[in-house]
Structure formats: structure tokens, C-alpha cells
Amino acid sequence: MTTDLMEKVQLFEQRKMSRMTTSDRVSASREAKGLILELNELYKQNKDETIMDIMKRLTVIKRKIEKRLKGNLKV
């Protein structure tokens, strides 16, 4: 794996997600999507399980952000 990509992932995971503005949430969601897609390209080549674990962690974070963006729409 590229060290640059791993640094980006590590910085993203360590970022505080509380008290974010809507704009910050949108950009964080897009950044997570980009990181997941980059990792997916690496995973296609290597089939390394650690890459899959990282993608799963990022997906959980991304879903939390998007859930907060969409709001609670229960009736």
C-alpha cells in the first residue's frame, strides 16, 4: 500500500467528527468516499484483508456522517 494513502486514511480517522457544520459533513463524506474508492483499487490488485478492514472502518464513519446529514426521518 502507498504510505501517502495510509497517512490520509489515518488523518481522516483521527479527525474529530463532533460539532461539524453541514458543509464540513458533506466534504468529509466525499473525502471518505474518495478514500474508499482508492483503497478498493488497491484491494482489487492485492486482495489484502487489511485493506478490506480499513475500507469497512471508513464505511462505518461515512454512514454515520451521512445519517447525520439526512436527519432522522421517522414518522
Image (cartoon, grey):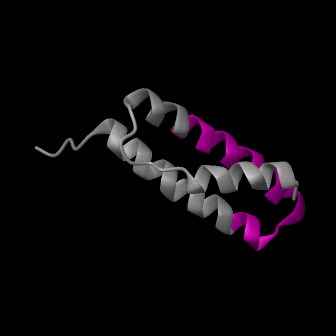
Q: Tell whether 47 sits left or right of 30.
A: right
Q: Nearer the viewer, residue 24 or 44?
A: 24
Residue depicted at x 81% and y 69% = 48
Q: Tell whether 5 sits left or right of 68.
A: right
Q: Quadrant of the image for the N terminus?
A: bottom right
Question: Residue 23 occupies which quadrant of the picture?
Answer: top left
Residue depicted at x 75% and y 72% = 49
Residue stretch rendered in magenta on the structure: 29-52
Q: Can you see residue 40?
A: no
For the image, the number of numbered tags is 0
Q: Nearer the viewer, residue 3 or 1?
A: 3
Q: Tell whether 53 sits left or right of 14.
A: right
Q: Quadrant of the image for the C terminus?
A: top left
Residue occupying the far left of the picture: 75
Q: Can you see residue 48?
A: yes
Q: Position of residue 58 (x, y in %)?
A: 58, 56
Q: Position of residue 68 (x, y in %)?
A: 33, 43
Question: Residue 53 occupies which quadrant of the picture?
Answer: bottom right
Q: Position of residue 9 (x, y in %)?
A: 69, 53
Residue occupying the far bottom of the picture: 49
Residue depicted at x 59% and y 56% = 13
Q: Main secondary structure of the magenta part?
A: helix
Residue depicted at x 57% and y 35% = 30
- Can residue 74 be found in the magenta stretch? no
